Amino acid sequence: MRYSKLFGKSTRVVSSEIRSRGHEFLIRGGFIRESSAGRFYLLPLGLRVQERICGIIDEEMSALGAQRMLAPVLHPLELWQETKRTESVSFELMRVKDRNTREFVLGGTAEEMMVALVRQFAISEKDLPFCIYQFSTKFRDELRAREFLMKDGYSFHASRDDFEQFYESVKESYFRIFQRMELDAHSVAADNGYMGGDYSHEFIVESPLGESRYLVSEDGAYSAHEDIAAFRRELMNPDEELLPSEVTAAERGISIAAGVEHYKLPAWRQIKSLVFFTEDQEGVLVSLRGDLDVSEAKLMRALGCKQLRLAHEEEVRALGSVVGFVSPLKLKLKKVGDLSLTSVRNFYTGADEWHRDTINVNYGRDFTSDILADIALAADGMASESGSKLRERRGIEVGNIFQLGTWYSEKMAGADFGGSDGLRHPYYMGCYGIGVGRTMATIAEVRSDERGLCWPANVTPFDCHLVSIGKEEEVNAQAEEIYEHLRSEGYSVLYDDRVTSAGIKLADADLIGVRKRVIVSKRLIADSLIEVTSRRDGENIKASRNELCIELERT
Amino acid sequence: MRYSKLFGKSTRVVSSEIRSRGHEFLIRGGFIRESSAGRFYLLPLGLRVQERICGIIDEEMSALGAQRMLAPVLHPLELWQETKRTESVSFELMRVKDRNTREFVLGGTAEEMMVALVRQFAISEKDLPFCIYQFSTKFRDELRAREFLMKDGYSFHASRDDFEQFYESVKESYFRIFQRMELDAHSVAADNGYMGGDYSHEFIVESPLGESRYLVSEDGAYSAHEDIAAFRRELMNPDEELLPSEVTAAERGISIAAGVEHYKLPAWRQIKSLVFFTEDQEGVLVSLRGDLDVSEAKLMRALGCKQLRLAHEEEVRALGSVVGFVSPLKLKLKKVGDLSLTSVRNFYTGADEWHRDTINVNYGRDFTSDILADIALAADGMASESGSKLRERRGIEVGNIFQLGTWYSEKMAGADFGGSDGLRHPYYMGCYGIGVGRTMATIAEVRSDERGLCWPANVTPFDCHLVSIGKEEEVNAQAEEIYEHLRSEGYSVLYDDRVTSAGIKLADADLIGVRKRVIVSKRLIADSLIEVTSRRDGENIKASRNELCIELERT
């Protein structure tokens, strides 16, 4: 490809909505361009990278025995109603009507569509297991990228054991996929959310820009998304004698810190109590140790609800308490307590009156909860359940895999297989996603330097970036000749044939980040040499024409 | 691929809505499956064929210097409003709102999207010409396939001449593309419709199932879609003397045939007059020679309107005439006449009263039209303008190319380039479509026999279909060995490893239509032979294992 002819050449113009360095380089380098907010054109350079990413995923999925197919973009709304996911999906479903006013969903995920296909066939036990996958455009109205290419796979099994074996092999396959793209992805246990099923794993590439917060134990044995990360509640004062509780005056502020200052006692001595309302306007009194924070994700799971909001000051007052002095002792609300409430003897807590506390409160003796569960956020430095210290990390989620169990096959009629026992059974399912666009963006983010992108060997848009320096006829002639030579050897070449300064050409080569740069210049021609530079480490070799291909192959 | 593991194996079940033999084979063979009406899943076999079709198109587009990219599926509605195509597009635009109630169109064609992208760059004359294309899902609510993959390309030029040269090269490229798929496509001049621009060509594969009716001159020099096909209006009676017109009683029926019977004169002697209403309720009196039929497409183009409907009997009466006796002489309506009105001397026509005609009516002397134009349908046997006889054909439209001129670049702000004269000029555009799904369906239609599909070499889903016949261990062992051998030689193999009858396996191989069938059986093993059969012509060769690859390569 001659750079002078490339559609979407590098540009200084940058959209006002730049999110990060990688995003800026992708736009400036001519890989992507925004259409409307969150919807992007893939320019020729960007499409080349995307195709290579898809190629790697495709190979690894095939190696698993998975089969590629493609479902329609528009999903009949009825399918989503069969599983009632129209009510639970957290991103907004985009809906569209056809001329017959039949309603469709622009798919953000395709479990129902795949089950609707599979149930058209009379599946029997000998057809199982199988895995089908597709590369398809997904629509999620809430994300930064609202329209993106995703690889989504769905597996069908006769038994839980068979599923679990496959799930582990997908995990290994995902690690290979990301390794081939030189992405260091961690698998992190995560919440299933609206997907149904019991457990899942996110594949996360560590990055300060990431939206995923997760915790990893120092011994490496445990890693989990903050939404589910478990931690040990150490007994804080197991040897203390239980004291009789009493109500006292407490001229303290309403924050935990104010309690610490007033009593000269650590934060864990206080009970933190908060009132929430669910989507059904049910009030819930939530209590936990003062040094911990509520995890709304865990709390929603414990309550089985879909939304939560903190009560306003007036609502708390109307319930008979006062913000900062709410206690788990008196209010007539559903009570949810964190496991940490059993780890402290002689708590103090508000007394549901302004500037009054109850001291020496003990779980079990003075109060209990309707639900006692893990509803607190894990944080850096806490102990994992096995005792190893947890470390907080941030990263970008590039893939996820979900156990779905029989969540879909039990809700959708006919989603079953004929067993060897002569009966029909719901099949056991899993699903497996990789965000292709997200993966490209992540590589751009973590594999770039201050000058531009540095594409890994397996996803570089071209094998080499040929740059001619100087306007002399002999330079031009040699560059043309090398361009043809490399192409005839099977290399893909981006050839900067522009009549412009060396500075501009070299800066563009750095920006675009093709893995190897090949330079032809008058000075080099004099010595019958060509310069080959690795974009990643800047390693620079002068080679003869015969050595050129060898240098390009060098990692 | 082991057939026992293939997702979407052949099935006897056939959807109630079968359209044709090819469509039935695609469903029964396990290539596609319907989701909702007009929306299909591509199963693994179907996707393999689609990928090969895309591969051929991609190679030929690259050879033209065109560059592949990808635009978002959702087009901002504002773009379609810029060109006012929201009002003119004949298929129903599917619209969707996001959570911010911004409105989008599900693209059926992407001219506005591409111009919106190109105008983000400061294009100058030296950047022109270029052509960008994509493979993307298109949505057209009125078609049999409402969601389908299309290759759509868009070219940008500094001048009309440059465009015309490129347009011709695309035409040649399209012929190569269809030839490589063994489709005999004709290029046929067609109407531009809602696309804007002045001229276009459809690529049509002849088939009685096709929806496109077109006319080809016997000398091959002229071919055109019925919507624009021109023909010569021969002078029918040039030597007749003009007679004075007079009103007479005419106890004839209202059809042209009834006039022929009553007067014992040929149909061309009568003037056929019809009243239409446009979408604005404007009445139009349309007249043409009695042996011709109105082409609504031509008539709409002559009128510059978008819809037409024939007037009811009462509406004609209210206008002061009567159906069957309408004449172009008196009614106070806009009059459109076909060119044929000047080809006959001494017409007869109704006299706007029941059972009264005016005879010896002559165009120019007794009446004229506000618009005299080609508004009649060409039909089999008529003479083309050069005199060669026109023959009517039917076919399936697999591609189309459009001259767009500056239709878009003049309507969309900033859709221009910096010329060498220092000024900005609108660019000259063309666009180029190939329906990928339509192409697959057409191959299935025209390349099948009563037993099933017969895929051409370049789009066959597998290179060969390996079938083992017999349950003996040695048969199985040799089939497995040949399966591995062929794969190691780089062939894609569909291996029917099922434990089922030879009859079922051979019928399925015929149905699926892989180009070459390889049979391993006990009888053949005894002679150290393998049977290779060509699906198309049934040619059958027994080969040794060493000759196997040679036989597979044979066309």
Image (cartoon, coloured by chain):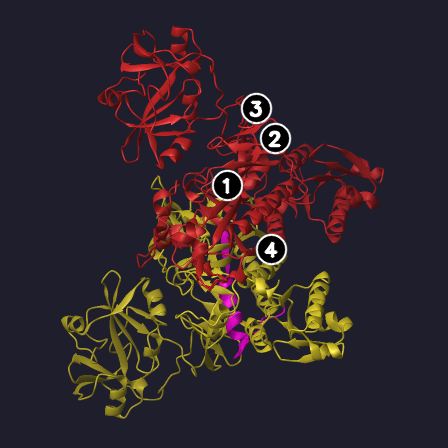
Chain colours: A yellow, B red
* Residue A202 shows in the view: no
Q: Secondary structure at mark 4?
A: loop
Residue A453 included in the magenta stretch of the image: yes
Give me the C-alpha separation between circle 3 and circle 2: 10 Å
Q: Nearer the viewer, residue B368 or A119?
A: B368
Q: Secondary structure at mark 1?
A: strand
Please tell me which of labels 3 and 2 falls first in the chain.
2
Please tell me which of labels 4 and 2 falls first in the chain.
4
Horizontally, is B314 left or right of A42 in the view? left
Residue A429 in picture, x, y percent from top left: 50, 54
Please tell me which of labels 1 and 2 falls first in the chain.
1
Give me the C-alpha separation between circle 1 and circle 2: 18 Å
**Which residue is under mark 4?**
B65
Please tell me which of labels 3 and 4 falls first in the chain.
4
Q: Nearer the viewer, mark 1 or mark 3?
A: 3
Q: Name the amino acid, label 2.
A: Gly
- Magenta part of the protein: which range? A428-457
Give me the C-alpha separation between circle 4 and circle 2: 30 Å
Q: Are marks 3 and 2 on the same chain?
A: yes
**Which residue is under mark 1?**
B200
**Which residue is under mark 3?**
B389
**Which residue is under mark 2?**
B220
Q: Name the amino acid, label 1.
A: Ser
Q: Name the amino acid, label 3.
A: Lys
Q: Nearer the viewer, residue B485 or B220?
A: B220
As displayed, is residue B120 above or below residue A125?
A: below
The residue at 37%/75% (across/down) is A377
